[in-house]
Image (spheres, rainbow, N blue to C red):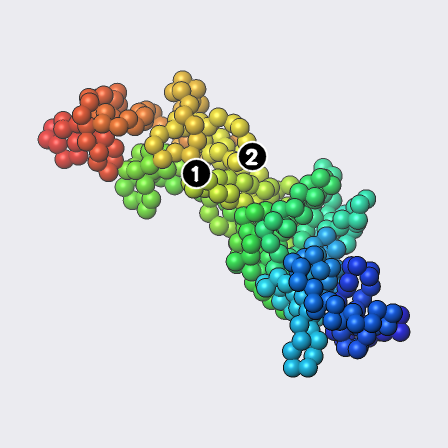
Amino acid sequence: MNEYDGELPTRNLVFNTDLDRLLDLDRDDLGVPEQPGLWHRLRADRRPVAQRGLLCPTCRDARPEQPEWMYLSFRRGRRIASHHNPHRRAHTAAQDEQREAYQERYARAAASDGHAVEIGAGTADGRRPAVLVTGADGRRFGFEPQLSYVSAQSVRRRNRLAQEDGITAVWHTVDPNAPLIDHVHWVRTDNLPARAIREDRDLLLRGGVRTLRLLKCDRVSPRPCQVRGGGRCGRWHPTWAVLVPRIDDFVRRVAGGVYVPITQRTRNGGPLRFWAPEADRRRFLANGGVLADRTDRPVVPRQRGADHPRVPEQRRAPHRPPHRLLLPGDPYDPVGEPLTSDRVIPPVRREICSAGRIPCGAPGARLYPGGWYCDAHRPGAPG
């Protein structure tokens, strides 16, 4: 079909893996005159779509590692090849321009900080990230603008392949409901046209980046104690808040090692993946936080509703004043001081009173919002 090479972008094409060639559905013989009746044989194939050997040629060229299977139909007198994936949108030049614009913006931001940049750099086995950045200490990052639909299974596989190549993938989506969210480390921007992406204007990340905040667990706190599972303990608890940086700053900070990938487990056991400052990660761990990819024993003893195992009291870190972490001139302590309290919070045991600095321990206690208490120590008791 060399005589039609110049017409390929405007013709109705599908790639047949059995024949290893493009089929032109606008031609009666599909461009394969040596295979008479080919259209009828293909239409009569009732095997699963992925076994029929019909691929989208545009997707095949752009992402050979992610095949997009197609099926044939006949509508209003015209032969049509459609994506089997119902979420796959039609190919548009605008989407390709968006992808190129994001690649240019990644490269421009990384190069402005002196990092080496390669666009479409292939690995030894043919795999290639959209933009490969060699950052601090020789670490490599692959920035991937994923503007089309991709399944969680596919993106996990591609992320694993990048890790095997020594590349930390940075996934970028414009869809707030993209399946890749929290299956890999991701960021999200608004869905903007290529012209707006290329302009030197603020392009903010709407999700995927967080920073550490310290919340006092007292009566004005909007949530129950995350250690005790109820009531308020008076401690300072570390928690993650959404951060909204510019995409250019984000690229530079990832390449420079300032931002690192974080993986946590939610209370229902699912993963929570995002990017955060390395200083925040160290401070989070120093204050009893637990990450899904670490085995460090936490500082704070576990109580009912906690997300980490119990640690004996004698293993807790020495006391340091919690206000030390709140100094305005020290937003990122490189060491991170543990947030502890002089008060010992006893383990919660069913029907055992836990009141007092030294737990009462009386049996027959009843459950109140703040824990199990006997009649003498129940909320509102006289004395």
Q: Amino acid at mark 2?
A: Asp
Residue 264 location, x and y as percent?
A: 50, 39
In the drawing, what numbered circle is on residue 200? none
| Residue type, numbered disc 1 | Pro
* Direction right: furthest residue: 3
Residue 355 shows in this picture: no
Q: Is residue 259 visible?
A: yes
Which residue is labeled 1 in the image?
238
Label 1 element class = strand
> Which quadrant would the N terminus be assigned to in this image?
bottom right
- Circles 2 and 1: CB distance less than 8 Å? no
The quarter of the picture where residue 374 lies is top left
User: Mark 2, mark 1: which one is toward the viewer?
Assistant: 2
Residue located 83% across and 72% down the image:
36
Q: Position of residue 9 (x, y in %)?
A: 77, 72
- Quadrant for residue 313, please give it: top left
Q: Which residue is mark 2?
A: 293
Residue located at (30% from left, 28% from top): 348
In the image, is residue 55 above or below residue 219? below
CA distance separating discs 2 and 1: 18 Å
Point out the tag, 2 or 1, that comes first from the N-terminus: 1
